[in-house]
Amino acid sequence: MPLVVVCGLPYSGKSRRAEELRCALAVEGRAVYVVDDAAVLGTEDPTVYSDSAREKALRGALRAAVERHLSRHDVVILDSLNYIKGFRYELYCLARAARTPLCLVYCVRPGSLNRDTRVAEGEENRSRNVSVNWRPRGEESGSPLAVGTSVLRESQSVDSEVNGRAQVDIPKNLELEEARAPNLPALMTPELEKSVNHMPNAFYPPELLEALKLRFEAPDSRNRWDRPLFTMVGLEEPLPLAEIRTALFENRAPPPHQSTQSQPLASGSFLHQLDQVTSQVLAGLMEAQKSAVPGDLLRLPGTTEHLQFTRPWTMAELSRLRRQFISYTKMHPNNENLPQLANMFLQYLSQSLH
């Protein structure tokens, strides 16, 4: 069954979107597997993305976990940053090899798509020396916040990255947030609410967030490995479940490469018959051209078509064309072509000699 790749920067709502999609598909009776960083590492560890060697190992583990679960019977949801387009292409190749469709869900923080107005606001707020801080105030004083405690944050200057360009997201008013996950849309089921409340909230240091924004390679629907693409801005916008179902269960799987396909079965005597038929056609052609004049239509043994005689042909020239035809036919052996080998060879000679 299909593969769903969830992509986006930290704090963009990827895990909640993945859980919402999992619950919607599970209600329909489908087997759904969610592969994320915590499932591979045992616990979510943002510091992995600050070490290139550990991050490379994480991507390999995620790819292996997806490959283990990917089949024609189960839905696999990969919930991770997936910010490297080369890694997304590898996932596309896995889905293509498994002959199953895939789609990409791109999660974006609210306000990150309107660059011009946000940059202008950012320059205005920078003149007021607004500081950047992702840690709640309760943690700044050294005491962790209890779950469910309300936190009042001032306006903050937060850079975001969309389509490879730095942007600024600055709330104008004071924002009331919960230390736990914010509320989902009104259509959230009790099962989804319970699972969201138990989601881990890993803390990404500001310098790591900035580095991830600079390294982020946004999806592009023009790339075959990034489509169909569903862009979700914030958590208020409902998940397009109908369109996602269509992309996953009604679309065709990516076509496999011809080089990775098994050759069609051919009998053990295919090459022998090919050699015998082409030899008979050449022998008949050499005999028929002895009494032919330019413009005659030559009828050769084993064929139902005619070859127009334009000039005398040498055996060396005909043998060269015969070897080329045999080399090409060996690459695409098929028992269904055996009765037509003589006509196919005659057509090849007709196109090559005129």
Image (spheres, helix red, strand yellow):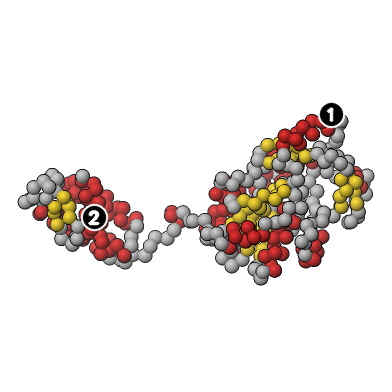
The residue that mark 1 highlights is: 127
Q: Judge whether 73 appears above or below 5 on screen.
A: below
Disc with the residue nearer the chain's start (2 vs 1): 1
Query: Taking the image as drawn, is residue 197 in sight?
Result: yes
Nearer the observer, 270 or 4: 4
Nearer the observer, 287 or 25: 25
**Residue situated furthest top in the rendering:** 127
The answer to whether residue 22 is left or right of residue 228 is right
Crowd class of label 2 (few under 14; some 14 to 19; many from 20; radius 10 Å): many
Q: What amino acid type is highlighted by mark number 1?
A: Ser
- Which quadrant holds the C terminus? top left
Q: Nearer the viewer, mark 2 or mark 1?
A: 1
The answer to whether residue 252 is left or right of residue 76 is left
- Which quadrant holds the N terminus? bottom right
Measuring from the top left, give residue 40's x and y in whole percent. 69, 57
Q: Secondary structure at mark 2?
A: helix
Q: Judge whether 5 appears above or below 212 on screen.
A: below
Q: Judge whether 131 appears above or below 143 on screen.
A: above
Q: What amino acid type is highlighted by mark number 2?
A: Phe
Measuring from the top left, give residue 130's x and y in whole percent. 86, 34
Residue at point 43%, 54% (across, down): 259
Measuring from the top left, give residue 52's x and y in whole percent. 68, 44
Nearer the observer, 354 or 132: 354
Measuring from the top left, give residue 128's x and y in whole percent. 86, 30
User: Quarter of the image holding residue 268?
Assistant: bottom left
Crowd class of label 1 (few under 14; some 14 to 19; many from 20; radius 10 Å): few
Query: Taking the image as drawn, is residue 323 in sight?
Result: no
The residue that mark 2 highlights is: 345
